[in-house]
Amino acid sequence: MKVKHVTELNKIDKNIKPRVEKALEESGGLLRLAPCWVPRSFLHPGKRLKLHPDDLYAYGLNRGGIDERWFASTTPAANEGRTPDEGLSYVVTGGERFTLADAVEELGSEIIGEYIWSTYRRWPVYSKFFDNMGPIPHHMHQSQEQAELVGQEGKPEAYYFPPQQNNVGNNFPYTFMGLEPGTSKAEVRRCLENWNKGDNGILDLSRAYRLQPGTGWLIPPRILHAPGSLCTFEPQWGSDVFGMYQSLVEGREVPWSLLVKDVPKERHNDLDYIVDQLDWEGNLDDHFKENHYMEPVPVADTQKDGYVDRWVVYGKVGGKQLFTAKELTVEPGVKCTVKDGGAYGMITVQGNGRMNNLTLSCPKLIRFHDLTQDEVFCTEKAAKEGVTFENTSDVEPLVVLRYFGPEANPDAPAMGAHKKSA
């Protein structure tokens, strides 16, 4: 690419339709995306996003370190003091840039497909790399009904731990999930009562699971979880609602405001309401791992052809398929055409190659304003017709992660499918 820095691009907000159409024609139905970096004031960067060490606090020390990179996002980050476009992915074409959100708004079903556009009028999901040095607070994401009370949307999410992003496990590669069966509402309420006394003890009521690269978990709304320190690929609903139920993490205070930021104001001190936000049946599930744990499942037997496509995120939330994800590995010198059921966001995690008419290259180190050649959005039309991936290396595999929107893959496996494919 001739332009190497986002700041050198002309940002446009109007009359983008012809530019989008031209970019799609030239690329074969694809849109090149610039990196989208997101800081968190209450977290400690894990340093595995390939972002240059000098740029970890590029938004300013007061904003916190950058420990997330969002992919194909049309969802603003819910951060205090955020920049106007924080969390929004930019399309890059012809020395210009505009948000993916604007492109979707202009072309609608031509990009994301008729079902998603007519149902949601936006790209309703996104994914990210979440990269933290240690664990984060035990928290939940509100359901759709709860989030609507504050003008937001609910947030289910899923995890996959790419081996390429996890050369080290950092400080605590374990995640607490749910609550120990038998835990009472009174015990959780007592933790909230003890918020200002130091560690409120919420983790004493939960259980931790050791995280393994190459595996994943599905987390519905209202389920408590304290993600550990593996770098995580997280397909999720396009929302940034949450409530932190833990008052102290690694000696760092978690303010009460982060517990109630997505709770109606009149309920900010209503402990019973806050306790009842949780899905008690789901949190106390005796078979929690069986109902939430995932291992990759091959899409088809194509290894003899030099490539393997695997489901890495699957399963349903509340009976609905809200998102799915696949990991494609193409061996050196191999070219393959892959068809999918819907539009997707894609990130390259290893190697070099091509995707239709776009170059793919996994960077080794990225400056904050650098453009990269590792991220792409694929339209539904191109996905259904088939996208050609080519590994142009003679040394290492080309590996890409793709995440999809709701109901894009009716053939996706059900939870527990990895046991049958083993």
Image: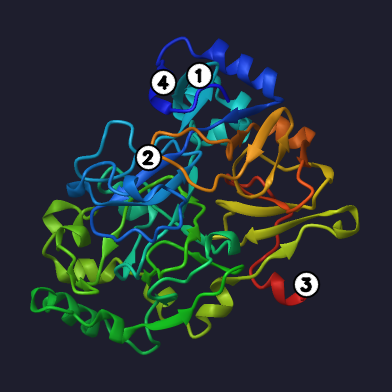
Whether residue 168 is situated above or below residue 412 in the rendered picture: below
Answer with mark 3 or mark 4, whichever residue precedes in sequence.
Answer: 4
Spatial CA distance of label 1 from label 3 is 42 Å
Name the one closer to the observer, 349 or 315.
349
Answer with mark 2 or mark 1, whichever residue precedes in sequence.
Answer: 2
* x and y, in percent, of residue 71 in the image: 50, 43
Per the image, label 3 sits on a secondary structure element best described as: helix
Mark number for residue 8? 4
* Mark 1, residue position: 106
Q: Nearer the viewer, mark 3 or mark 2?
A: 2
Per the image, label 1 sits on a secondary structure element best described as: helix
- Looking at the rendered image, the quarter that the N terminus falls into is top right
* Mark 2, residue position: 87
Whether residue 396 is situated above or below residue 368 in the rendered picture: below
Under mark 1, the amino acid is Glu
Spatial CA distance of label 4 from label 2 is 20 Å
